Amino acid sequence: MAKEIKLACNVIEQVEAICDKYGNQPGELINVLHEAQSLHGYLPEEMQRIIARKLHIPVSKVYGVVTFYSFFTMTPKGKHPISVCLGTACYVRGSEGLLEEIKRVLNIEVGETTPDGKFSLDCLRCVGACGLAPVVTIGDKVYGRLQPKDIKKILDEVAAND
Amino acid sequence: MKTLHIEDLNKIREKAQAALVLREQSDSASSEQSCGLACGAKHMQLLCCGGTGCKASSSHKIVENLQKALEANGVADKVEVVTTGCFGFCEKGPIVKVIPDNTFYTQVKPEDAEEIVKSHIIDGKRVERLLYVDPKTKQHVSDSKHMDFYRKQVRIALRNCGLIDPENIDEYIARDGYQGLAKCLLELKPEDVIDIVSQSGLRGRGGAGFPAGSKWKHALAAKAEKKYVVCNADEGDPGAFMDRSIMEGDPNSVVEAMAICGYATGSNYGLIYIRAEYPLAVSRLRVAIAQARKYGLLGKNILGSGFNFDIEIRYGAGAFVCGEATALVHSMEGKRGEPRMKPPHLTDLGYMGYPTNVNNVETLANVPIIMTKGAEWFASIGTEKSKGTKVFALAGKINNVGLIEVPMGTTLREIIYEIGGGVKDGKKFKAVQTGGPSGGCLTEKHLDIPIDYESLKEAGSMMGSGGMIVMDEDDCMVSVAKFYLDFTVNESCGKCTPCRIGNKRLYEILTRITEGKGTPEDLETLKRLSEVIKETSLCGLGQSSPNPVLSTLANFYEEYVEHVKQHKCRAKQCKALLTYAVMPDKCKGCGACKRGCPANAIMGDVRKPHVIDPYKCIRCGMCKSHCKFNAIHVS
């Protein structure tokens, strides 16, 4: 049963254009998803249906790929996406404590977004700034050598600068 | 576009060498040498690290500010600012190196740019406060070759990182870049190229250590209308950044090596499979590919030899299992990255059904220099079975976090205590983890074994891609094993049962133990289950995923027993086994802990010792991090 399409018309057109750009080839599915996500921020079900139709593959296959790779997401991110590095270097220098503190301050779990849409929380494996461990990224900015007590101040600052 | 010939390549090399000679010669400059324009230097260069780690500390702003300061002081025509790749010494980044006097500034901030230019460049006085301080002698060290961190290193794969501008192909050419490719195309037959690679003893740097020459030979032997060369840049090991640094600091070495591999295996198509999480590496590779195409070093009829080769970039999307070559190929085809049984090997049946040769970034980065310097030279470095060098990302509880490259056969002790400067904060060394989620934890007794593929395997770990994490007495080995299992459970593709379900069970048992609910039988189950998973999993991920459990069981059995029998965690990491209390004799009653406590579990009046209510306490440790008097006791 086809679900009601809620995406804006121009988004639909843009996604279709992305599919066309890659020749509607099933082999280009991951590239298409990368572009679609950078366009829209996330990959809602409707968008996956459009891509499946254009590439002539079952929507289950698109869904299978989207859920397989951690880079793809089906939920919209917050205005300031937070990522806590859980690479080994950050882990042994205490990043788990940072994660607990962020969860507590924002009252969200990993993978969730705050109700006001400001922050979303994710974990990632290694930013590559191991010299600054433990590391948290908010948007494009990397915060290094953090302790749990620094978290609230940083989040307040980011929220205040909106 | 006209075809570039070897004579043209040599002309570009000569022209670009002028700028680089200054940098290469400065390596022999002594620290007593005077510096700055005042002392007669006609032309100077400021090299600033533009790797991801240093960029996170605003190194691009440093470059901007240096440029501004040079212009403001009217010396911009005599001093050039160059953004290079990673210097490796990430702990002390961002780094600025001054050429020709070879001064090595550490932890530079954007606001220091003005002082470097005024004091060093104009007045000829080094900025002492930005120099590296030797932790043993407490003396300032002005050049890198006198630092313990660099003294034992041999940089082959990282030969150009921190030396050249990665976005300028001319500088790569000046360092004999593309000479290896020229030699192969113009003087050697594909079989000869493979012979050189085989004789050099180069083995896969991605983890398993398969001889590169044998792989290439299989690929050459495969008969097909089309073949592919793939660079595996899906570096997913948490805490490892060797490949990224090579791609960021010396992307042309990967491009050149792929072309050499293409010629040797009879392929005209190259693909780089890279993590989408590495935006800087992607952009540097794109620049390198575009510049190589412009010179005709990629494309049709390369160097007039009649050989065609070009490279495309494919993006990963965050799946550790895609580092496994068959899974990687599936992912490139737009599918879920699930591995498959071998044989058929990828060199027979790979990308889109065509023979495909997959090599890791670091393996490839070694190839061009093997071609120019010869197989004997490369084979003279390293141990009997493992030749050359290995790059490691040294991190964790160690003083000098960074990217290092050492000859095979170097001991862990040399790496940790000499290059790494020992364990952080004077704590006691406990373990070193190599090989990431597939490797194991090694202890004090393993520190003197010379590192190579065989010795690490024998010790119960593995070379892996090169992550090396040092742990101290504050790290709980059960928690570390749990940490890796959490990773594997997340990253298991789910195709085969032992890995999908077995690892989940391992993780649950480990969680139980860290919560103080484990039983002695659990330890037996852990061992038996681990062995079954190792034997019956389909791919390398599952076959190696229990290694962190097995190696910690073997080397830290008593810690497991303590958790299970005495409900005690000696490293004070397992929250459920801890109690927090205020020591009345040390508490000044400042109230910092009370204000910091998220659970309102701390009571007490000002200037009187406070008390923690054990029933309200959530064991978050905030009180301990807020207390300035070290009055919180954890037991």
Image (cartoon, coloured by chain):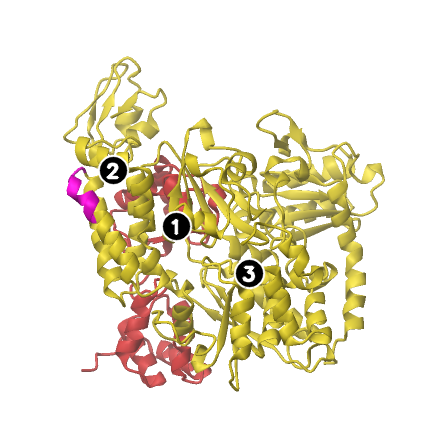
Chain colours: A red, B yellow
**Label located before the other in sequence (1 or 2):** 1
Say yes or no: labels 2 and 3 on the same chain.
yes
SS for dot 3:
helix
- B8 is higher (above) or lower (below) than B353: above
Decide which of A55, B69 is in the foreground and name it.
Answer: A55
Q: Position of residue B503 (x, y in %)?
A: 25, 55
Residue at point 38% right, 40% down? A92
Q: Position of residue B444 (x, y in %)?
A: 42, 34
Q: Is residue B108 visible?
A: no
Quadrant that contains the C terminus of chain B: top left
**Amino acid type, mark 3:** Thr
Spatial separation of the CA atoms under disc 2 and disc 3: 38 Å
Q: Magenta span has B521?
A: yes
Q: Which residue is mark 2?
A: B560
Decide which of B450, B126 is in the foreground and name it.
Answer: B450
Q: Magenta span has B476?
A: no
Around disc 1, counting alpha carbons within 10 Å, would you say few (fewer than 14), some (14 to 19), or many (20 or more)? many
Q: Which residue is mark 3?
A: B363
The mark found on residue B439 in the picture is 1
State left or right for residue B40 relative to residue A77.
Answer: right
Task: Output the chain of dot 1.
Answer: B
Around disc 2, counting alpha carbons within 10 Å, would you say few (fewer than 14), some (14 to 19), or many (20 or more)? many
SS for dot 2:
helix
Task: Output the chain of dot 3.
Answer: B
**Amino acid type, mark 1:** Gly
Spatial separation of the CA atoms under disc 1 and disc 2: 19 Å
